[in-house]
Image (cartoon, rainbow, N blue to C red):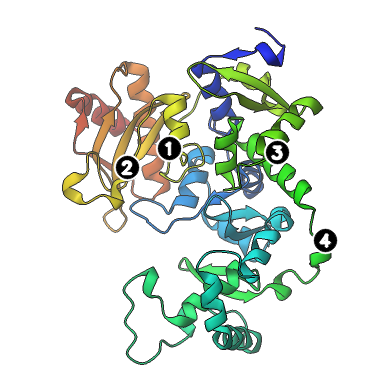
């Protein structure tokens, strides 16, 4: 294989291998610990938060996909009392290693300075409310939205119609005046930033150049391989100027520029994955959250695997093709299908409403064993050990899969 970056050509299979390995989806550790979980969050750079819990809520599922049978409360403890992570906007609202706080502080200051979206006018019009909410938390300690009464006659119809205090909390969190102290039943409790990060001083802010370089390095290390557009999407950073940063990485030996078959633009590989990732065995089969770092960029997912994926919970039911909350199935580096599951916790049932394989996937004993094993493992972790498989496509998959799951 050529080593000259200007002539390095990769197949899509090469790019897939690098992406999967960088995302810690090539193999699963034995007996994972809380230290392993923290190391994984640091490796990923951020873990997107979502509240839907047809199965586990997304951040917990993202980590299970890589670690397997870990204790979900470890993630809660990393936020409180450990303070090893914090919540803020990254790819979206995310769990982020605390050491990345300085890199996102500039975004908070843009929020507080009125540079971000419609919040600017709202903050001006509701300045007394913002002060009142801050004073209440200063006086009473950590509070959640439920601790603030809605105005008489207020009727909430969704996020666009939050009661004013909830909007104020979100605005103050976005500006960094408040932080998420902990979650109780997944509901946020807010605390003053100076109480949770008493040693922080905005004089410690990195320069804009350093901030962009560090975020680009974290994202490229987490992705393994990316084009300029794909890299910008990871932390939702501006694409302008990012190509220059990547070329600087190449010149410094921190990245390798490559051409991937059928990709119109060059891609870049983080130096830590080249060429080591090319030799890593892909042994892992798992289920992915719709918000998993590997697949949250739907365009990149299509470019890598030709896997066309839509989260259909936002699609009217009559128009859904696969189901409300389908999970991509990753087998040994390949996206082979999707699962429409429901964890029925009270009944102890992990219901597979449907399992769909991609066209041209070859069904053999190895595939059946791998898929059955991940179904059992996911069900066990959810504490819903009874796996019920209702339907599969192809239909002939159902009976041998039921038999293998039942043997576990």
Residue position for label 2? 326
Instruction: Name the element at disc 3.
Output: helix
Of residues 176 and 371, which is closer to you in this image?
Answer: 176
**Image x and y of residue 138, in percent:** 66, 85
Of residues 331 and 223, which is closer to you in this image?
Answer: 223
Residue position for label 3? 217
Task: Write the residue at 41% across / 59% down.
Answer: 51
| Sequence order check, earlier mark of 3 and 2 | 3
Q: Name the quadrant containing residue 244.
A: top right
Q: Is residue 181 visible?
A: no
Q: Name the quadrant containing residue 82.
A: bottom right
| Sequence order check, earlier mark of 4 and 2 | 4
The answer for how far apart the CA atoms under marks 4 and 3 are is 20 Å
Instruction: Name the element at disc 2.
Output: loop
Residue position for label 4? 204
Residue position for label 1? 298
The answer for how far apart the CA atoms under marks 4 and 1 are is 36 Å
In the drawing, does residue 360 fall left or right of residue 21?
A: left
**Crowdedness near tag 1: few (<14), some (14–19) or many (≥20) residues, C-alpha within 10 Å:** some
| Sequence order check, earlier mark of 4 and 1 | 4
Instruction: Name the element at disc 1.
Output: helix
Of discs 4 and 2, which sits in the foreground?
Answer: 4
The answer for how far apart the CA atoms under marks 3 and 1 are is 22 Å
| Sequence order check, earlier mark of 4 and 3 | 4
């Amino acid at each position: 294989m050529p080593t000259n970056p200007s002539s390095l050509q990769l197949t899509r299979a090469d790019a897939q291998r690098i992406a999967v390995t960088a995302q810690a989806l090539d193999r699963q550790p034995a007996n994972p610990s809380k230290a392993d979980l923290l190391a994984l969050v640091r490796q990923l750079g951020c873990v997107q938060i979502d509240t839907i819990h047809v199965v586990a809520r997304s951040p917990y599922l993202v980590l299970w996909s890589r670690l397997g049978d870990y204790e979900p409360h470890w993630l809660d403890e990393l936020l409180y009392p450990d303070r090893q992570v914090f919540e803020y906007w990254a790819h979206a609202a995310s769990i982020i290693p605390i050491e990345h706080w300085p890199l996102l502080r500039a975004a908070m200051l843009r929020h507080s300075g009125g540079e971000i979206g419609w919040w600017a006018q709202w903050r001006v019009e509701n300045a007394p409310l913002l002060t009142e909410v801050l004073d209440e938390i200063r006086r009473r300690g950590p509070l959640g939205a439920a601790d603030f009464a809605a105005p008489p006659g207020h009727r909430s119809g969704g996020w666009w119609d939050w009661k004013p205090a909830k909007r104020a909390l979100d605005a103050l969190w976005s500006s960094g005046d408040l932080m998420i102290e902990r979650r109780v039943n997944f509901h946020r409790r807010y605390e003053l930033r100076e109480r949770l990060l008493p040693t922080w001083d905005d004089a410690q802010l990195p320069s804009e150049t350093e901030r962009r370089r560090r975020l680009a390095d974290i994202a490229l290390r987490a992705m393994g391989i990316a084009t300029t557009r794909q890299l910008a999407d990871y932390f939702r950073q501006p694409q302008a100027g990012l190509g220059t940063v990547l070329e600087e990485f190449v010149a410094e030996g921190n990245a390798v520029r490559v051409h991937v078959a059928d990709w119109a633009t060059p891609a870049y590989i983080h130096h830590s994955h080249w060429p080591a990732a090319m030799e890593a065995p892909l042994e892992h089969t798992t289920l992915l959250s719709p918000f998993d770092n590997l697949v949250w960029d739907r365009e990149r997912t299509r470019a890598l695997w030709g896997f066309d994926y839509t989260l259909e919970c936002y699609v009217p039911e009559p128009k859904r093709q696969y189901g409300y909350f389908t999970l991509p199935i990753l087998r040994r580096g390949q996206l082979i299908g999707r699962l429409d599951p429901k964890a029925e916790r009270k009944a102890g049932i992990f219901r597979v409403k449907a399992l769909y394989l991609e066209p041209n996937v070859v069904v053999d004993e190895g595939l059946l064993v791998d898929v059955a094993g991940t179904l059992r493992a996911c069900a066990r972790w959810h504490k819903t050990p009874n796996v019920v498989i209702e339907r599969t496509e192809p239909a002939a998959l159902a009976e041998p899969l039921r038999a293998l799951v039942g043997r576990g």
